C-alpha cells in the first residue's frame, strides 16, 4: 500500500526551470519516498529536450564539466539532462553518454538501477512510470529495470543499500535481480571494478539506516569479497553483533566495527569508512583480547585497559569501544564490572588533591594512585 500524496510542482516564469528550454521532471528518490510516505531529504530533476548551453543561459551552474548535471542557482538542487548510456568497458565509469536533446524521458529512466527509482513526476503531479515502479513499491520489491543492470557493478552496492534502508518496510530483492547480481560477481571474478570510495559511500549510507545488516547479508549472498570469505557461522555472529549495535548507537563507525570486530577479512573496508574507524577497530580488538584475561586477572589489568581507552577523558574511545564489546553479547558480567570500575575511577578528580595543596608532578601521581585504589575497591567488591 502506498500512503504518500503527489503534489503538483509550480514555479514562476523567471525561475530557471521555466527558462531552460526543456521539460522538467522530478525523479528518483523524492518520488519514491513521497509515495512511501517517507521524509524527502533531497530532490533531483531530469530535463528533457534541453542542451548544456540552454541550461547555462537559464542560470544553472555546471557541477562537473564532463557530466551533464547542473545546480539550480537558488535551491541548489541537481538538474541532469536526459541521457542514454552505452557500456564500453568494465566499471561504473565505463560508459559513453548520449545527451542529445532528443533523448526521451523513458530512455533516461531505462538507465536507472531499480524500478522504484525509475518513476518521474511532471509539473502537474502526473506520474510517469514505464517500468511499473509503483507496483513494486506496493509489493515491496527491489527489482532491476532492464538487463543493463549488469553493466555497472556499483548497482550491486546500491541495491544492497536500498535493502538496508527499506528493510524495515519489508522490501526484498526479487529472485531474478538477485541472480543478475550473482552473475556480475561470478563473471567479473577478481576483476570486479568497485572503487573503494564508492564502497565507502554506499556502506556509510547503509550503516546510517535502520537495518544495515541487510546490506552485508545481501553482499554475502551474492558472493562479494571479502564478505563472502567469512565462514557462515562467523558471519551470522557478525550480523547479530551489528543488529545489537544498532540498538545501542546511531554512529555508523561504531556499528561497522561491531560488525567487523571478529572478521579480519573486513579490515581493508575500514579504510573506506574513515581513519577514526580504523583506529577504533584496532582499539576494540585489543580490548577484546584483554577481556578474557580480566576474569582471572588483577585490578592492575583493569587499570591498564582503562588507561588505554582513556576512560576518564571525554575525547577517549572508551564509550565507543564499550558499545562495540557489548554488541558482541559476550562477557556481559565482566563488562558490567569493568564499567563499575571505570565509574568509580572517574569520580576521583584532580581538584580533590589540589584542595590538599598537592601540585605539579605529585598531583599526577596522587590522581593515578587514587584512581587505581578506586578501581581495586570496585573490582574486588
Image (cartoon, rainbow, N blue to C red):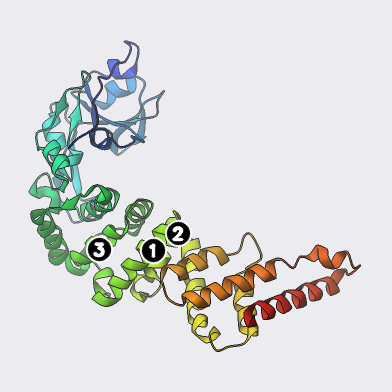
Tag 2 secondary structure: helix
* Vertical relation: 274 (above or below) 371: above
- Sequence-earlier tag: 3 or 1: 3
Query: Residue 272, can we see it?
Result: no
> On the rendered structure, is 184 left or right of 168?
left
Disc marking residue 371: none
- Of the 4 image quadrants, the one containing the N terminus is top left
The reply to whether the C-beta atoms of the residues labelled 2 and 1 are less than 8 Å apart is: yes
Q: Position of residue 160 (x, y in %)?
A: 24, 55
* Vertical relation: 27 (above or below) 216: above
- Sequence-earlier tag: 3 or 2: 3
Q: Marks 3/2: CA distance? A: 20 Å
Q: Position of residue 236 (x, y in %)?
A: 28, 71
Looking at the rendered structure, the number of numbered marks drawn on it comes to 3
**Viewer-side label of 3, 1:** 1
Which residue is painted at 35% across and 62% down in the image?
243
- 347 or 303, which lies in front? 347
- 357 or 105, which lies in front? 357
- Check disc 1 and report the residue beneath it: 244
- 25 or 347, which lies in front? 347
- Check disc 3 and report the residue beneath it: 217
* Vertical relation: 204 (above or below) 68: below
The reply to whether the C-beta atoms of the residues labelled 3 and 1 are less than 8 Å apart is: no
Tag 3 secondary structure: helix
Badge 3: few (under 14), some or many (20 or more) residues near its Cα, within 10 Å?
some
Q: Marks 2/1: CA distance? A: 7 Å
Badge 1: few (under 14), some or many (20 or more) residues near its Cα, within 10 Å?
many
- Of the 4 image quadrants, the one containing the C terminus is bottom right
- Check disc 2 and report the residue beneath it: 248
Amino acid at each position: 500500500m502506498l500512503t504518500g500524496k503527489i503534489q503538483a510542482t509550480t514555479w514562476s516564469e523567471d525561475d530557471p526551470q521555466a527558462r531552460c528550454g526543456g521539460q522538467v521532471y522530478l525523479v528518483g528518490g523524492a518520488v519514491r519516498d513521497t509515495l512511501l510516505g517517507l521524509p524527502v531529504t533531497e530532490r533531483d530533476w531530469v530535463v528533457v529536450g534541453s542542451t548544456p548551453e540552454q541550461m547555462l543561459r537559464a542560470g544553472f551552474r555546471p557541477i562537473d564539466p564532463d557530466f551533464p548535471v547542473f545546480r539550480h542557482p537558488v535551491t541548489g538542487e541537481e538538474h541532469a539532462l536526459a541521457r542514454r548510456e552505452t557500456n564500453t568497458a568494465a566499471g561504473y565509469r565505463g560508459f559513453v553518454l548520449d545527451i542529445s536533446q532528443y533523448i526521451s524521458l523513458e530512455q533516461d529512466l531505462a538507465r536507472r538501477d531499480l524500478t522504484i527509482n525509475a518513476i518521474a513526476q511532471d509539473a502537474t503531479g502526473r506520474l510517469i512510470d514505464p517500468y511499473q515502479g509503483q507496483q513494486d513499491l506496493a509489493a515491496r520489491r527491489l527489482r532491476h529495470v532492464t538487463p543493463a543492470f549488469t553493466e555497472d557493478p556499483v548497482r550491486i552496492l546500491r541495491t544492497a543499500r536500498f535493502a538496508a534502508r527499506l528493510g524495515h518496510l519489508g522490501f526484498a530483492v526479487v529472485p531474478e535481480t538477485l541472480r543478475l547480481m550473482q552473475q556480475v560477481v561470478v563473471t567479473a571474478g577478481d576483476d570486479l571494478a568497485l572503487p573503494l570510495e564508492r564502497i565507502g559511500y554506499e556502506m556509510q549510507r547503509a550503516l546510517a539506516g535502520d537495518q544495515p545488516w541487510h546490506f552485508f547479508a545481501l553482499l554475502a549472498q551474492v558472493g562479494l569479497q571479502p564478505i563472502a570469505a567469512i565462514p557462515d557461522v562467523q558471519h551470522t555472529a557478525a550480523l547479530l553483533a551489528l543488529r545489537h549495535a544498532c540498538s545501542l548507537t546511531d554512529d555508523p563507525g561504531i556499528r561497522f566495527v561491531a560488525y567487523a570486530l571478529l572478521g579480519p577479512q573486513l579490515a581493508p573496508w575500514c579504510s573506506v569508512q574513515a581513519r577514526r574507524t580504523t583506529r577504533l577497530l584496532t582499539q576494540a580488538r585489543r580490548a577484546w583480547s584483554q577481556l578474557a584475561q580480566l576474569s582471572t586477572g588483577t585490578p592492575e589489568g583493569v587499570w591498564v585497559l582503562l588507561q588505554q581507552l582513556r576512560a576518564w577523558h571525554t575525547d577517549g574511545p572508551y564509550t565507543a569501544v564499550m558499545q562495540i564489546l557489548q554488541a558482541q553479547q559476550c562477557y556481559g558480567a565482566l563488562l558490567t564490572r569493568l564499567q563499575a570500575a571505570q565509574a568509580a575511577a572517574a569520580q576521583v578528580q584532580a581538584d580533590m588533591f589540589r584542595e590538599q595543596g598537592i601540585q605539579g608532578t605529585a598531583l599526577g601521581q596522587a590522581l593515578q594512585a587514587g584512581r587505581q585504589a578506586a578501581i581495586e575497591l570496585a573490582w574486588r567488591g
